[in-house]
Structure formats: C-alpha cells, structure tokens
Amino acid sequence: MAKPTKLQLYPLRDMALENPSDPIRFYFWPLIGPLYRRRVEMCLEECQGGERVLEVGFGIGLTFRNLAELYQEVHGIDLFSDTARVGRFFEQKGIKTLLRNGDVLSMPYTNEMFDTVLLISILEHLKPEEQLIAMGEIKRVLKPGGQLVYGIPVERPFMALMFRIMGVNIRTLHFSTEKDVGQAAEQTLHRVKLQDLKNPIIGFGAIYQIGHFVKPV
C-alpha cells in the first residue's frame, strides 16, 4: 500500500498574506483542519505524475508544492485568482507555475495537453446541466490515458453544519451533488474508482468523495 500523502503547507502567515479572504485558516483549525487537509491529500494520492498537470480552481495554490514534486509543469486556471501574485509567491519558493484566469467550461488550452486534470471542491459550484460541458472540456485537454481527479463534498447534515459554523449557507454555493458530478464523469470517461472520506463521528457516513477517471487510449 502506498504511503499516505501529506499536504505540504507553508506557514499560515505566508499563505494568508497572499489572499486574506481565502479560507486557508480552516486548514490549521482543530477538528476541521485535519478534515480539510485529508480531503486534499486523498486527491493528491490519486495523481500519478507525468509531464503536465492542470489544477482547475487553484485559488492560492494550496497543492502546488506537492504537484511540483510529481509533474514537470504545474498549470492552473481559476476564475478569480490573482495569477501574477500567486505565480510570484511560488517563484520565490522555487516553484515555477503557469497560471491563467479562465473557466472550466471553456478552457484556453490545446487538445491532449495534460497528463492530469485536478479539481478540488470546484465541480459542485456548477449547475447540473453544466457538468457534461465541463467533462467534455476536461476530456478534450487530457492526453489519451490521462486522468481526471476530483474531490467533491457529499451532502449530509454534518457538511451543512460545518459550513454554518463558517458562516456560509451551503445552498448559496453548491448547485450540484456528488451524484450529478459522478454521472457526468461516467458518461464521458472511464472510472477507475470513487473513494469516500468518512466522517470521524461513527454513523454519520461520508463527507467527501474523490473521483478518479481516465480518458480512453
């Protein structure tokens, strides 16, 4: 069995300075922090390495230290992130990134460019009818045999409570469920596996799901 991946975080004071509004602080909180980190780590454990990886919705680049150890080129696309600022931050840390602003529904990349496309807590923000469009774009930019790895919350009362604790109504942010995403992925790519992150409280079920799919050769 492969050794579990540990998310390589920079000190909070460094990462928080990049984007004070980013919820990076939750990764350092007791109780919630380990769950936040573990969901990312489970996604990273599915990433097989290669020439190029694309993270959709990279935010402040939480995964970039890990991805730079697995891939020759780390690419990122995000609707709102300050790409120049994030790029400079990681360049100062010795990590080169290639970042753009853009949308998963119409990505500015050539066909068959990436070994891996990674999305962590992104696809739930799309409407159900947009999932197939997103999957079609992901399939287009993946190399034959390339992998899609995604993480998505599993909608349960515990997850809604966690968002409430953070002052957020989950319904104002999440439009698709894990089932919507999984069905669209099944129609577009070949499933390797679906894996759940269990709630640490016995009997409360899964709180997060990791999907691993591949593009047919």
Image: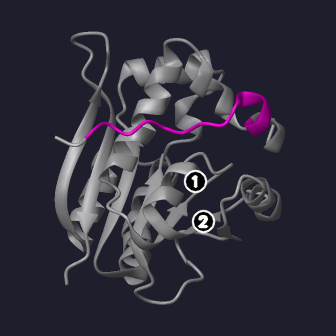
Where is residue 44? Give x, y as percent. Answer: 39, 48
Q: Looking at the picture, tell me which residue is in the foreground, 206 or 5.
A: 5
Left or right, 201 with reference to 89: left
Q: Residue at x 40, y 86 (%)?
A: 112
Left or right, 27 with reference to 112: right
Segment colored magenta = 3-15
| Numbered circle sitting on residue 64 | 1
SS at badge 1 = helix
| Residue at the disc numbered 2 | 76
Q: State whether residue 62 is above or below residue 118.
A: above
Q: State whether residue 115 is above or below residue 206.
A: below
SS at badge 2 = strand
Where is residue 65? Give x, y as percent. Answer: 57, 50
Quarter of image, res 29? top right
Q: Residue at x 55, y 12 (%)?
A: 30
Say few, some or many: other residues with alpha carbon within 10 Å of mark 2 (under 14 / 14 to 19 / 20 or more): many
Among numbered discs 1 and 2, the one appearing first in the sequence: 1
Q: Pointers 1 and 2 in contact (CB under 8 A)?
A: yes
